[in-house]
Image (tube, rainbow, N blue to C red):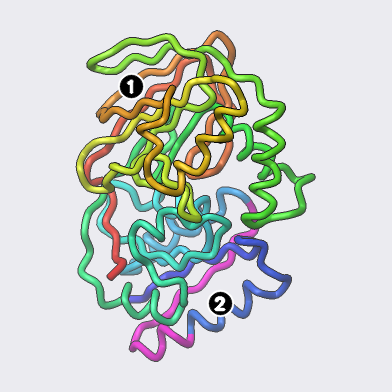
């Protein structure tokens, strides 16, 4: 049985030609560990999902996603509720999931640990019918994700993401949402509504400090609109894990929730922006994915 490696050629602002260098490196590393490599390079959005399905049909024993959170999402969505596990080589702008899982950023070590790891199970979330493995959200983070993923945005990487985020802090107009969970129904004008399976966006920005990947629950984070200077002052709390103590922020554990808005909502799953409807349902799928990381 072989090990499939799915490579995103542009993740993390990779230079031209990096994908083929990554493909050669993956094949060589796997060969050194006595594994047969089945390496593919993505060519379009959604291609990683299709390549993963094809690899599973060929009978691979493990699929390694080499890319950012969007690539990992596509691969994980194709592996969800199945027996073939996922492994990760982080190469994105944020790498939030990989950081929480403790995945080494050096491909040699990430692959070596993955091929000898015992698979474990983690949860997946769903928002608007789309699966996510790390985070999903509505509001300013989805707005920034939509701008980041535009074809006109030729810049990638964390610095460009920060630039777009700074612009959005000034110009973004929040909407009113009605949020219903098993315990509460609230109407709120929110800067963002995040449904978190894991802790962080990436680069140490911890939006849901208490989230766990294997607890059978999601963390619903609501940051209310307020004075923008106060919003900027909250930003350091993302990096200290103390956002829950900020005024206008609430975090609650959920299994299911419904989010409604008068206008169709743009939302994101693992950083990939999607045009949604006026109602989005969120839910957790406990233990839906097998993963090999250590």
Position of residue 221 measured from the top left corner of the image (x, y, whole percent): 39, 30
In the rendered view, would you say 113 is above or below 191?
below
Residue 135 place in picture, x, y as percent: 42, 41
Which residue is the extreme one toward the right?
A: 152
* In front of the other: 134 or 79: 134
- Front-lying residue, 276 or 239: 239
Looking at the image, can residue 125 be seen?
A: yes
Question: Residue 149's image quarter?
Answer: top right
**Figure label count:** 2
The range drawn in magenta is 28-44
Residue at the spot of label 1: 257
**Which mark is drawn over residue 268?**
none
Q: Which residue is mark 2?
A: 23
Eyeballing the image, is 255 above or below 183?
Answer: below
As measured in the structure, the alpha-carbon distance from the residue carrying label 1 to the one carrying label 2 is 41 Å
92 vs 165, left or right, is left
Q: Position of residue 124 (x, y in %)?
A: 32, 43
**SS class of the residue under badge 1?**
strand
Q: Sequence order check: which comes first, mark 1 or mark 2?
A: 2
- Closer to us: mark 1 or mark 2? 1
Q: Are marks 1 and 2 in contact (CB under 8 Å)?
A: no
Quadrant in the rendering for residue 217: top left
**Residue at the location (70% across, 29% down)?**
170
Residue at the extreme bottom: 32
Tell me the residue at 41%/60% (across/down): 98
């Amino acid at each position: 049985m072989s090990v499939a490696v799915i490579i995103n050629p542009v993740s993390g602002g990779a230079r031209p030609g990096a994908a083929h260098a990554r493909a050669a490196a993956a094949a060589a590393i796997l060969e050194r560990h006595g594994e047969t490599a089945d390496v593919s390079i993505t060519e379009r959005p959604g291609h990683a999902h299709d390549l993963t399905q094809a690899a599973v049909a060929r009978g691979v024993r493990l699929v390694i996603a080499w890319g950012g959170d969007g690539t990992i999402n596509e691969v994980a969505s194709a592996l969800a509720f199945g027996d073939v596990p996922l492994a990760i080589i982080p190469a994105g702008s944020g790498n939030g999931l990989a950081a929480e899982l403790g995945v080494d950023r050096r491909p040699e070590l990430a692959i070596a640990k993955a091929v000898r790891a015992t698979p474990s199970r983690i949860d997946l979330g769903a928002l608007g019918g789309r699966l996510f493995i790390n985070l999903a959200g509505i509001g300013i983070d989805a707005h920034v994700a939509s701008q980041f993923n535009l074809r006109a945005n030729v810049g990638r990487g964390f610095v460009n993401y920060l630039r777009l985020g700074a612009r959005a802090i000034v110009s973004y107009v929040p909407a009113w949402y009605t949020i219903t969970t098993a315990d509460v129904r609230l109407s709120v004008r929110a800067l963002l509504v995040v449904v978190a399976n894991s802790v962080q966006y990436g680069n140490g920005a911890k939006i849901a400090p208490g989230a766990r990947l294997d607890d059978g629950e999601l963390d619903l984070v609501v940051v209310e609109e307020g004075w923008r200077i106060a919003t900027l002052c909250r930003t350091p709390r993302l990096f200290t894990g103390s956002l829950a103590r900020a005024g206008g922020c609430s975090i609650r554990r959920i299994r299911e929730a419904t989010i409604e808005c008068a206008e169709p909502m743009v939302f994101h799953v693992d950083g990939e922006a999607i045009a949604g409807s006026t109602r989005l349902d969120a839910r957790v799928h406990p233990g839906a994915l097998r993963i090999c990381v250590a």
